[in-house]
Image (tube, grey):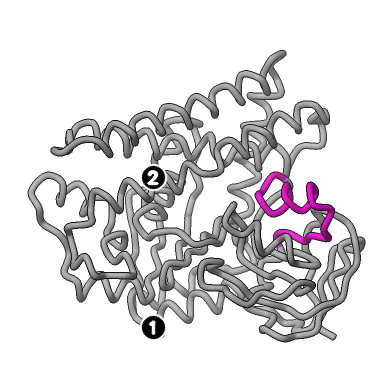
Amino acid sequence: MLIDNIIENIKPQEYEKYWSLKLSLLTAFIIGEYYTNLLESDYQQRFSKAIIIFREGYVSCFLKSKDRERFAKQRIKHILGQDNGINEFCQDLKQGVDSLAETINILEKQKVIDYRLMQKFIRDFSKYNGLHITPRHLADFSNKIKKGDLDKLKKVRVYSENIHYQVERLFQLLLNKAVNKKNKQHLELCCFKKELLNYLKNGSFPSVTELQSRFKRVALIFTKNKINILKTKSDVDRLEDSLTRQTNTTILSGQTAYKGKVFGLARIILDPSKCKDFKTGEVLITGMTRPDFVPLIKKASAIVTDAGGLLCHAAIVAREMKKPCLIGTKLATSMFKDGDRVEVDANKGVIRKL
């Protein structure tokens, strides 16, 4: 009954799919906890709720739109209200990336992990996510940013692109003895933050059965000082269906990242490493893109994403390659199917099934 009440009390119209990409449950857990708890110590506010839905290595994060707008206004006031605010912020973000990369390098070389250093690293990585999401909020909610400053934000955003990959590589290295080395699903990365620290301190770790269950599906609902975990297929499906329900099954709106109009066959790609036959001219539809999507983007006639803002990877690459691109459609990956013939009209900000 408690789970039923949790799901029923979530109003889908209040939420947006903020990001959706291939990511470990461990990293997603740390980020979700930061959004709803630790963010407040850095910015005097927090997101009231973060919903993480994880399925076989793919994660979607839903946040309340009002929380995002409130965070953006605070960041805009603070950064744009200073004479050299954009430059100072970009420097802070770059230093945050460099500091994390340096600590990762130290930890990867240690034969015996310095437990306190690892604790500090997790705290630093948590705090870094406040910096990481700021450029997107500045670009998405402010029309007062000069082109030169927007270019600086884009440049530092690209500079920070790979840090989450490096963090995940470190976690995997630290935990590679926790489960059978023949494991190809990286089940060790389905642990939670406390479980990671417990393993490094005393060697205890969740059972393979528990990790396999999480890898298959799990939903985490973060609020201040509380996490509700949904494990069953019916509960996770109900929550996800509620958040992604679409009434119009033929047309979807998004934000134009680069204009243009094309017709093509839809291809839904969540993990580019598993895609071997993407054909030139197909329309790439995904949650969000990262650098490993670039070979597919080069072949695509257009790019359509569920999530992302004007400074997301898909938007930046699409503008560089001059390819029609719609971002933030929220539901494209669930609404369209492989082989659907679609029209992407980025001039009007829509994608429709023909």
Q: Position of residue 185 (x, y in %)?
A: 34, 70
Q: 158 and 321: which one is in front?
A: 321
Position of 71 compared to 236: left or right? right
Asked whether residue 276 appears in the rendered view, the answer is: yes
Hey, which quadrant is residue 114 in on the image? top left
Asked whether residue 15 appears in the rendered view, the answer is: no
The kind of residue tagged 2 is Val
Hey, which quadrant is residue 101 in on the image? top left
Q: Is residue 9 above or below residue 40?
A: below
Q: State the quadrant of the N terminus.
A: bottom left
Task: Identify which residue is drawn at 48% across, 81% down.
Answer: 238
Q: Is residue 241 above or below residue 96?
A: below
Q: Secondary structure at mark 1?
A: helix
Q: Is residue 308 above or below residue 211?
A: above
Q: Position of residue 171 (x, y in %)?
A: 30, 49
Q: Secondary structure at mark 2?
A: helix
Q: Which residue is mark 1?
A: 233
Q: Is residue 109 above or below residue 352?
A: above
What range of the chain is rendered magenta? 311-328
Q: Position of residue 266 (x, y in %)?
A: 73, 78
Q: CA distance from mark 1 to mark 2?
A: 29 Å
Hey, which quadrant is residue 6 in on the image? bottom left
